[in-house]
Image (cartoon, rainbow, N blue to C red):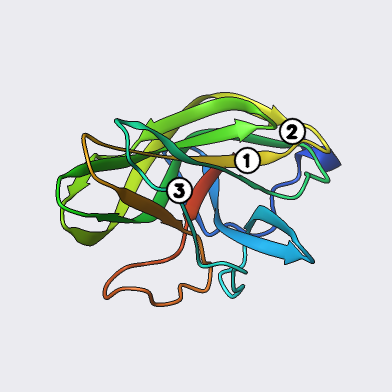
Amino acid sequence: MPILPVKFRKASEAAIASYNYTDIAEGTGVVTFYGMTTKQDTTKTYILTSSATNFSNDASTGSAAVTTTNAIRLDLDFDLSTFNLPKRIRGTAIVEASLSATKNATSMAYYYIAKIKKNDVVIGQAQSETNSVASDTKYETMTVKIPITTIQNFKKSDILRLTMEVWAGTASGSGSVSLFHDPKNRTVATSLTTQLKVDVPFVLDL
């Protein structure tokens, strides 16, 4: 009987120990990360965590007053701890984010742009649908798919980053927007998730 060759994986190619789910079609194991804030003394840090049991120091981050036409109102970087081993990412990432928007009188439009980054280099991005609010406060949860079409090799000490840009604009009056980011999903409004969630596809070593 012929002896079949045995493939031994290098330590750096070992799969992540636990995936939230696998996508057989893409050959990926998906890990879910949640955005949150921590605070040491007066220093606030935006991070990604794989634990949905953590309370964020702040459940949301709000903008300054929106009084002009469309412009970026929030620009937040949520960073995962540096990788201890090389990892490979490719496939479809999914971002789920909730916004609140308040506007007096006339209408204000708002949306977000989510960017997946290797360190500070964008490897995929997508824009959510555009919503509007007038003389009210609205809460919206919006989900986008972000294709990462080529294998991204993360070396030891590289950082996976989720950048959330919230855009809003109005022709007159004043408004504001907020982005929620609490892994524990504290209740703010009925039927609204306060989690900021990103599903990241890691290449499986099959």
In this view, the residue in front, 202 or 3, is 202
Instruction: Please state if 129 lies on the left or on the right of 194 as rendered.
Output: left
Farthest front residue in view: 173
Image quadrant in which you'd find residue 113:
top left
In the rendered structure, the answer to whether residue 64 lies left or right of residue 55 reads: left
Residue name at image x 59 percent, y 60 percent: 36
Foreground label between 1 and 3: 3
Position of residue 120 in the picture relative to residue 193 (left or right):
right
Amino acid type at image mark 3: Ala
Quarter of the image containing the C terminus? top right
Is residue 56 positioned above or below 162 on the image? below
Q: From this viewpoint, is residue 8 visible?
A: no
Disc 3 target residue: 64
Question: SS for tag 1?
Answer: strand
The foreground one among 28 and 126 is 126
Q: Residues within 10 Å of mark 3 (few under 14, many from 20)?
A: few
Pinpoint residue 71: horizontal percent, then vertical percent.
38, 31
Let me know if residue 140 appears in the view: yes
Residue with the mark numbered 1: 161
**Camera-nearest label, 2 or 3:** 3
Point out residue 48 in the picture as x, y percentages from the top left corner.
Answer: 63, 54
| Callout 2 touching callout 3 (CB < 8 Å) | no
- Alpha-carbon distance for marks 2 and 3? 71 Å
Mark 1 and mark 3 lie on one chain; the one further toward the N terminus is: 3
User: Are the residues tagged 1 and 2 within 8 Å (C-beta)?
Assistant: no
Mark closer to the chain start, 1 or 2: 2
Quadrant, the N terminus: top right
How far is the residue under mark 1 from the one under mark 3? 24 Å
What residue sits right under mark 2 in the picture?
2
Q: Residues within 10 Å of mark 1 (few under 14, many from 20)?
A: many
Disc 1 residue type (three-letter): Arg
Disc 2 marks which amino acid? Pro
